[in-house]
Image (cartoon, rainbow, N blue to C red):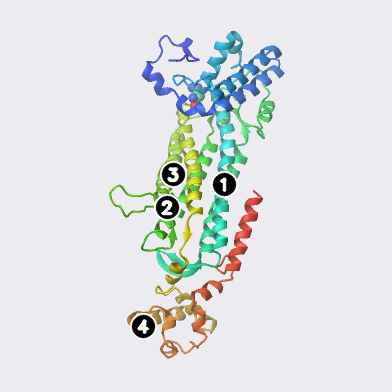
Amino acid sequence: MATVLWAERLLEQPEKEALSFQSSISVDKRLVFVDIQGSQSHVKMLAKQGILSAETAAILDKELSRIARDVEQGTLKIDDNAEDIHSFIENVLTERLGDIGRTIHAGRSRNDQVATDFRLYLKCAVSEIIHEVHATVTTVLDKAEAYAATIMPGYTHVQRAQPITVGFHLTAWASALIRDSTRFQDALKRFDECPLGAGALATSTLALDREYTASDLGFNGPVLNAMDAVSDRDFALECAAACAIVQTHLSRFCEDIILWSSAEFNFMHVADKWSTGSSIMPQKKNPDFAELIRGKTGRVNGNIVCLLTVLKGLPYAYAKDLQEDKEALFDSIDTVKQSLRMFRGMFATASFHEEQMKSACTGGFLEATDAAEYLVKKGLPFRTAHEVVARVVRDCIESQQHHIAERSLHDLKVHSTLFEADIYDLLRPEHCVNARTVHGGTNPQEVLRQINVLRTMYAAQ
Ligand code: ARG
C-alpha cells in the first residue's frame, strides 16, 4: 500500500483490504490535472504571501508541471494503491523533491482541495455536456425543418388525438433540450466559486489570499463561508439533477422512436447500422440503441437519489461520506454525454414513412375536435358541439365509416342543422394542421417560426 499522509498519528495502520476500502483513487484519478492546477495556484499564492520562498515555489511549480506531463505521457502511472489523487500527487512531489515537497500542504486540507478539484472538473464537464446538448438540438431541429409540413397523428394516452406534423413533434423535443442546456448553465453560474483556502473547515492562521487563488483558477471569487465551502455539494446535486432531466428527456424521445419503428406503427425507419439483430430469430431488427438510452436512465436517475441520500444525514462540516459524491456524478456525466452522442447518430440517420403516417390520420376520428369547433364558430356552445360530434362519431362506427367526411350532409344534419357543405374540406388532416395558426400551433409556418426561435435561443446561449 502507498504511504498515507496521516500515518504518524496512529500506532497501527488499517489492514490492506480496509485501506483499499477507504481509497478513492479509482474514481478520483480523473481529477489529476485539475488537482495539479489547484496546487500550482496554491503554491503561487503561498509565495506571494511570503509563506513559501520564491525559490521553493518555483521548484514546486516546475515539478507539478513535470508530474502533469509525465502522467499525460504515461511515464508516471497513477498508483492504484494510493489513498486518493491528492495524496498521490503530494507523495510524488516529496519522493522527487524531499523536504520541498513537504511544504505544499501549508494552509490547505484535502477537504478544500477536493471541493476545488471537483468544481474545476465540473466547469469543464458541464461545458462539454452543453456542447453535446446543442449539437443534439441542431440534429433534431434540422429534421424538424425537413419534415415541417409532414402530417402524422398526434397522440394522447397513446390513442390518436389530432393531426400534427413531424416538425411540430420534434420541435417539442428540441424545446426540452434547450431547457436542459440552460439548466446546466444556471448550475454553472452558481457553482463558479472557489473553496480553496477554506482548509479543513475554518481557513487558516496563515495569511492566505483566497481572492487570488480564486481568480487565478478562473473562478468568479472565493466561496464566502469556509465551512460551507467544504460541506456544500449543491453543485453536484444540481448537475446530477440536470443530468437526470436530460437523460429522462432522451428516454422519452427513445420511447417515441421505439414505438414509431415497430411494425405496428411503421412510421419510422431506423438505419441498419443503428440497429441490432437477434441470436435466435433470424428476421429480427431491434432498436437496441434507443432501448439502452432508455434503460441507462434508471442509473442516471438513481445517481441523484444516491447523492441526496449521502447528504441528507451529514452533520457539518466534512465527513468521509462525501467521498461517495464523485462516483455517482461522474457516472451521470459520462452516461449523459455518451447517450446524447448515440441518440444523435441514431436519429440523424433515421427517416420517416410519410405515407404511413398520413394514412394513420384516418380511422381514429382525429378530425372530431375540428368538427366540434366548426359548430362553435357557428354559435353552438362547445359542450353541445362536443356531444353532437360524439353522436356523429358513434354513427360512423356503427356504419363502419372511418372518417366524419364519409357521412353525407343529410346524415350530419340529423345531429345539427348547422352543418353545411363547407365542413368537408375542413376535416382533411392538412386543414386540421394548417388551421392551427395559434402561437405554439401545428401550422407549418408557425412550426418554422418556433424552430427559428429555438435556433436563436441556443445561438445566444
Ligand atoms: N478522497 C477524499 C474525498 O474524495 C478527499 C478528502 C479527504 N479528506 C479527509 N479529511 N479524509 O472526499
Q: CA distance from mark 4 to mark 2?
A: 44 Å
Instruction: Tell me which label, 2 or 1, sits earlier in the chain.
Output: 1
The answer to which of marks 1 and 3 sits earlier in the sequence is 1
Residue picked out by circle 2: 272
Task: Judge whether 59 appears above or below 138 on screen.
Answer: above
Disc 2 versus disc 3: nearer the observer: 2
Residue at 57% across / 57% down in the picture? 142
Secondary structure found at label 1: helix
Q: Residue at x 30, y 47 (%)?
A: 279
- Which residue was labeled with disc 4? 395
Ligand 1 closer than 8 Å to label 4 CB:
no
Mark 3 Cα-neighbour bin, 10 Å: few <14, some 14–19, many ≥20: some
Disc 4 from disc 1: Cα separation: 50 Å
* Residue at mark 1 to residue at mark 3: CA–CA distance: 16 Å
Residue sitting at 66 percent across and 50 percent down? 460
Please state which amino acid type lies under the numbered disc 3. Asn
